[in-house]
Amino acid sequence: MRIYNDANILNLIEQIRDINHLIELHKLSNDDFMLNQYNARKNDFLKELVFELICLDINTDEIYLFVRRLITKIENNTPKTNIQTINQHLHFSIKELDNVTN
C-alpha cells in the first residue's frame, strides 16, 4: 500500500484560506496595492499546490480536473509577460519544449 504525504498540501490549504481572508479585507478597504500583493501571493500558493498535487502521483480524473482548473485560475489571474523578454533569460525556448513533448 502506498503512503501519501499530504502535509504540504494541508499547509498550502491553510495559507490559501488565510490569504483569501486578507484579500476580502482589502477588497472592502479599496486598498489596490495590498490587494494586488495578496493576489500575487495567492497565485504563488496555487502554483505550489499544483506542484504538490502532481507530485502525489495520484492518477485520478478528479485530481487531473482539479489541477486543470487551478492552472486556468492561475492563467486568468497572472499578468502576461512579453515572450521576447523571457527568451533572453531562459536557456531553452518554448518551441523546443513543444518539440520534445510531442
Image (tube, rainbow, N blue to C red):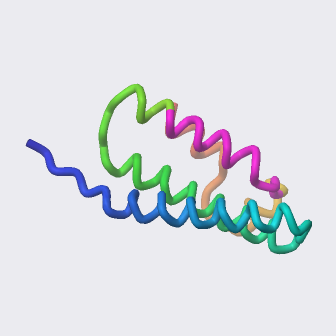
**Measured from the top left, where is residue 42 in percent x and y?**
64, 61
How many labels sit on residues? 0
In this rendering, position of residue 83 left or right of residue 57? right
Q: Residue at x 75, y 51 (%)?
A: 77
**Measured from the top left, where is residue 12 in percent x and y?**
47, 62
Q: Is residue 2 above or below residue 51?
A: above
The foreground one among 46 and 28 is 28
Residue farthest to the left, as pictured? 1
Q: Residue at x 76, y 66 (%)?
A: 25
The foreground one among 95 and 61 is 61
Q: Quadrant of residue 91?
A: bottom right
Instruction: Answer whether residue 70 is magenta in the image.
Output: yes
The foreground one among 23 and 93 is 23
User: Quadrant location of the N terminus?
Assistant: top left
Q: Residue at x 30, y 39 (%)?
A: 58
Q: Quadrant of residue 23?
A: bottom right
Q: Residue at x 61, y 63 (%)?
A: 44
Question: Magenta segment, principal secondary structure?
Answer: helix
**Measured from the top left, where is residue 22 in percent x and y?**
70, 68
Q: Is residue 60 above or below residue 30?
A: above
Q: Magenta segment, which residues?
A: 66-81
In this rendering, position of residue 54 left or right of residue 82? left
Instruction: Answer whether residue 67 is magenta in the image.
Output: yes
In this rendering, position of residue 66 left or right of residue 35? left
**Measured from the top left, where is residue 88 in percent x and y?**
75, 66
The foreground one among 35 and 85 is 35
In this rendering, position of residue 54 left or right of residue 67? left
